Amino acid sequence: MPPLLVVDAPSLLYRAFYGLPKSITGADGKPVNALLGFANQVLWAIERHDPRAVILCSGAEAATYRVAALPRYHADRPPVPDELAPQWADAPAFFGAFDWSWEDAGDLEADDLLGAYAQAEVANGGTVLIFSGDRDMFQCVGDAVSVLFPRGGKDGPELVDTKGVKEKYGIRPDQVPDFIALRGDPSDGIPGAKGIGEKTAGEILRVHGDLETAIANADKERPRVAQTLKNQADELREFRKIATLQPIEVACPPDAPTTFGPASEAATARGMNRLATRLEALAQKG
């Protein structure tokens, strides 16, 4: 069975917006760089992995319960740029022409919804590709789930599987929330354990297996690490909770191949002529 492709819409829209010049405009003279870059990224994945359907996931900027647990969570993130806001508003309609489904997590975040679709698809016997630039999603990786992680250059995103997570951090995917709690995540405003960096966080988890066991056996660590685990125990538990994806009940979507013809028309209407030509060629090829 072809994989289900679930896409972190905020992650890819921001990446495209900052990766392409704002001088790329539509017929009305307004920027379309984020929509264009987003489409090209997802089309790259479609041409190589032929997914059975594409789900674009969005959600709250910061889930309420996460902010309640850590007021600084996402606090340093700037508002949506003025040139991106109209493109973001147009994204569901534009990508709807591709027959890509746009789903929103409501009070939770896009990450939570990505994980929910991955879990539902695997439970139904399928496989999943999660397209996201958020390393939090590595906790979803398993035998049937891989992450397409964007990177610079012309090679396209990196395919990260269980082996890839271990090569990067020396841990299993299920240990990722514990790892984030210990190491911290500056992009989310999670400070982590004082004096514990990436290397030490990985070592702690390789020895103890999880955060709770590490806290219970803190005296077996060198004094500085032991003191940190004891002093920050409750705080680290909160960090782990924040980093752990929350369950959302979703149904496996039906098969929905990309409709390249209508997508080409939608691109033409927005002045994306080169993208329209590419889509028309894919329509004829299909």
Image: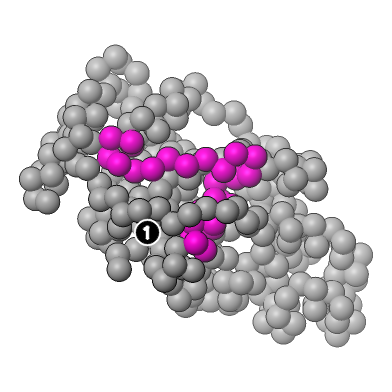
Magenta stretch, residue numbers: 95-120
Tell me if I can see residue 65 in this picture: yes
Q: Residue at x 58, y 76 (%)?
A: 172
- Horizontal side, residue 137 vs residue 36: left or right: right
Let me know if residue 158 is in the magenta part.
no
Q: Nearer the viewer, residue 98 or 12?
A: 98
Packing grade of label 1 (10 A; few <14, some 14-19, many >=20) is many
Q: Nearer the viewer, residue 197 or 140?
A: 140
Query: Residue 4 appears at what percent x and percent y?
Result: 37, 59
Q: Nearer the viewer, residue 40 or 145?
A: 145
Q: Is residue 164 above or below residue 151?
A: below
Let me know if residue 101 is in the magenta part.
yes
- Horizontal side, residue 25 vs residue 203: left or right: left
**Location of mark 1 (residue):** 4
Q: Residue at x 28, y 61 (%)?
A: 49
Query: Residue 85 appears at what percent x and percent y?
Result: 48, 25
Q: Is residue 208 above or below residue 87?
A: below
Q: Amino acid at mark 1?
A: Leu
Query: Residue 263 appears at what percent x and percent y?
Result: 23, 36
Q: Nearer the viewer, residue 85 or 255?
A: 255
- Horizontal side, residue 209 vs residue 284: left or right: right
Query: What kind of element bears circle 1?
Result: strand
Q: Which quadrant would residue 271 be assigned to in this image?
A: top left
Tell me if I can see residue 134 in this picture: no
Q: Is residue 258 above or below residue 60?
A: below
Q: Residue at x 87, y 61 (%)?
A: 234
Q: Pick out the residue farthest to the top.
A: 28
Q: Residue at x 12, y 39 (%)?
A: 280
Q: Which quadrant would residue 128 be assigned to in this image?
A: bottom left
Quarter of the rendering occupied by the N terminus: bottom left
Query: Residue 109 appears at what percent x and percent y?
Result: 60, 45
